[in-house]
Image (cartoon, rainbow, N blue to C red):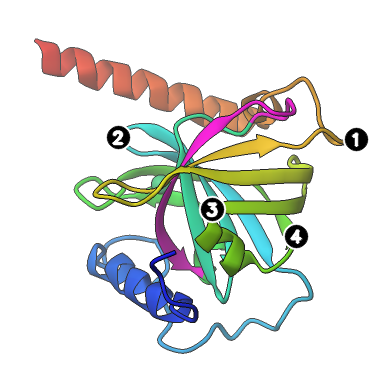
Amino acid sequence: GCEEAGGEEEEIRLTLKRYREKRRFDATPEPAPRSKKPSRPRRKAPIFVVQLHHAGRRHDDFRLEVDGALRRWAGPKGPSLRPGEKRLAVEVEDHPLDYADFAGDIPEGHYGAGHVDIFDRGTWEPVGDPADGIRRGKLDFQLDGDHLRGGWKLVRTQLKGGGKPQWLLLKRDDDEARDAEADDLMPESLQRSTRADELKRAARKQAAAR
Ligand code: MN
């Protein structure tokens, strides 16, 4: 690869800087990145979270804790629990670790405006070194969440080159594989907010077409 080993920390620092620059923390309820390493106690296993983000376009933000930050992949469709069913996951900027606890409304006019819900969270366990896997474009891992469990993988299909790196997220065939979509497993409250958001978006589109 063209990236130097040990460049991850610098990369995370830059990406968190971009995170900060895009937001006004006196106006959005999102967490400000801390200047120091996170103060929460060291857990045995790193965390993962899947946030359902009703921004201009609904997407799922799939986040894995790596080296003290949340690496992030955004997908237009939630993960599938059917083994081998590919879901586009676009690699986007990292977020501070505290973002894993965030659910709420990003106000209109702000970056990422819209409602954020937490769909699932838990711990994850990489097979091998995760930063190395991400650099090489192939990450195998286990999830231990409420909804997403067992073996998963992320495979990069398109390298950076102007656009954002594209990956596919897919379920491995194991005991936790099921004939279901993440969306089928959403609790009623999330289904309600998703429907409400779809209606809002349709109304906005109609108004714009007039
Ligand atoms: Mn998002």
Task: Say what secondary structure mark 1 lies in.
Answer: loop
Compare marks 3 and 4 and give the one earlier in the sequence: 4
Left or right position of 200 against 60: left
Identify the residue position indicated by label 1 in the image.
Answer: 175
Residue ID at (73%, 22%): 180
| Badge 2 vs badge 4, beta-carbon distance below 8 Å | no
Q: Measured from the top left, where is residue 138 in percent x and y?
A: 60, 51
Point out the residue furthest to the right here.
175
| Badge 3 vs badge 2, beta-carbon distance below 8 Å | no
* Marks 3 and 2, how far apart at CA: 28 Å
Q: Amino acid at mark 3?
A: Gly
Identify the residue position indicated by label 4 in the image.
Answer: 127
Does the magenta segment cover residue 94?
yes
Compare marks 2 and 1 and give the one earlier in the sequence: 2
Q: Measured from the top left, where is residue 196 in percent x and y?
A: 44, 24
Which is more toward the observer, 142 or 201? 142
Residue 34 location, quadrant: bottom left
Identify the residue position indicated by label 3 in the image.
Answer: 137
* Marks 3 and 4, how far apart at CA: 13 Å
Question: Looking at the image, is mark 1 or mark 3 nearer the viewer?
Answer: 3
Identify the residue position indicated by label 2 in the image.
Answer: 56
In the picture, the quarter occupied by the N terminus is bottom left
Residue 210 higher or lower than 145, as above or below: above
> What are the residue bounds of the magenta stretch?
80-96
Compare marks 3 and 2 and give the one earlier in the sequence: 2
Q: Amino acid at mark 4?
A: Val
Residue 87 location, quadrant: top right
Question: Looking at the image, is mark 2 or mark 1 nearer the viewer?
Answer: 1
In the picture, the quarter occupied by the C terminus is top left
The crowd level at tag 2 (other Cα within 10 Å; few <14, some 14-19, many 20+) is few
- Residue 114 visible to an observer of this rendering: yes
